[in-house]
Image (cartoon, rainbow, N blue to C red):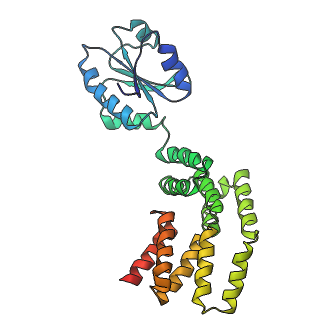
Amino acid sequence: MSSHIAEITMDNAQALLIDESFKRPIVVDFWADWCGPCKSLMPIMEKLANEYDGQFLLAKVNSDEQQMLASQFGVRSLPTVLILKDGQPVDGFTGLKAEQEVRETLDKYLPKPWDIQLIKAREHISEEAFDEACTLLREAYRSSEQQADIALALAEVLITLKRYDESQEVLSSIKMADQDAHFQQVQAQLELAKSAQKAPELQQLEQKLSAQPDNMDIRFQLAVQYYQNEYRSEALSMLYEIICKDINFKEGEAKKTYLDILAVMGKGDPVATEFQRKLYTLLH
């Protein structure tokens, strides 16, 4: 049996119905062998338990064998499905339901896909895997229609990745009503990061390029330094200017660096998508 499904007896009822319901929703399916609708509903419940992959526990109670449990929960007809949270029934239904109806009932009590992505992204952040976190947060930000807590998490990761303009764009999308103390903290963090001094080697190369704007060698060195200091958008802009003039500059090294940065940023990154499109247009 799946780890997301459990057979309930008096021995494990306290642990799996009550204690576990403080950690996640418990969906209790009261059934019996003689009940035809029960046998039609059970595959639907089991399918959803596996599809939702542990977001809830499907607790199967054979009402003939566990009459005391059925009585304690006030079960009077079969099938009966109850949803438990924090030790108490919060919803349920009786009789056979279509899969879509069951799904709609469950969705009221289960985390949304973007909330799960936010949890996973925070795990990546704790491991300092910021690019992976950024990819997840972008998806969650888009699918949640710019939910405020996800927007703030994305803005913070973008600051870490030194993508300040994008971070400001995300912060600007947050509605006034959601601009709480956390918002103010992230906004201040962005302003501080933007005002922080760049590495001396970057400043020196920027000054050299300003004095010799047509020097492609300096431009390439600066692009590499931008890349190494995680200013990826700036690096791509510099490299694009170079390969527009000479696609094989430095025996193709500029183009290779450009492609390396795109690969690191990953699909779904809007900046990467923009520069992929530019390269495609240039080559075709």
Judged left or right of residue 237, residue 207 is right
Residue at position x 51%, y 44% from top? Answer: 116
Q: Nearer the viewer, residue 91 or 118?
A: 118
Residue at position x 66%, y 87% from top? Answer: 209
Residue at position x 61%, y 80% from top? Answer: 221
- Quarter in which the C terminus is drawn: bottom left
Judged left or right of residue 133, residue 205 is right
Image spot of residue 212 (x, y percent): 66, 92
Image spot of residue 174 (x, y percent): 62, 58
- Quarter in which the N terminus is drawn: top left
Residue 279 position (above or below residue 79): below
Q: Nearer the viewer, residue 16 or 283?
A: 283
Residue 133 position (above or below residue 11): below
Q: Quadrant of residue 104?
A: top left
Q: Quadrant of residue 54?
A: top left
Residue at position x 59%, y 71% from top? Answer: 227
Residue 30 position (above or below residue 192): above
Judged left or right of residue 100, residue 231 is right
Q: Residue furthest front?
A: 251
- Residue 180 visible at all: no
Q: How many marks?
A: 0
- Residue 204 visible at all: yes
Image spot of residue 152 (x, y percent): 63, 55
Q: Nearer the viewer, residue 120 or 214?
A: 214
Residue 278 position (above or below residue 192): below
Q: Nearer the viewer, residue 178 or 168?
A: 168
Image spot of residue 122 (x, y percent): 59, 47
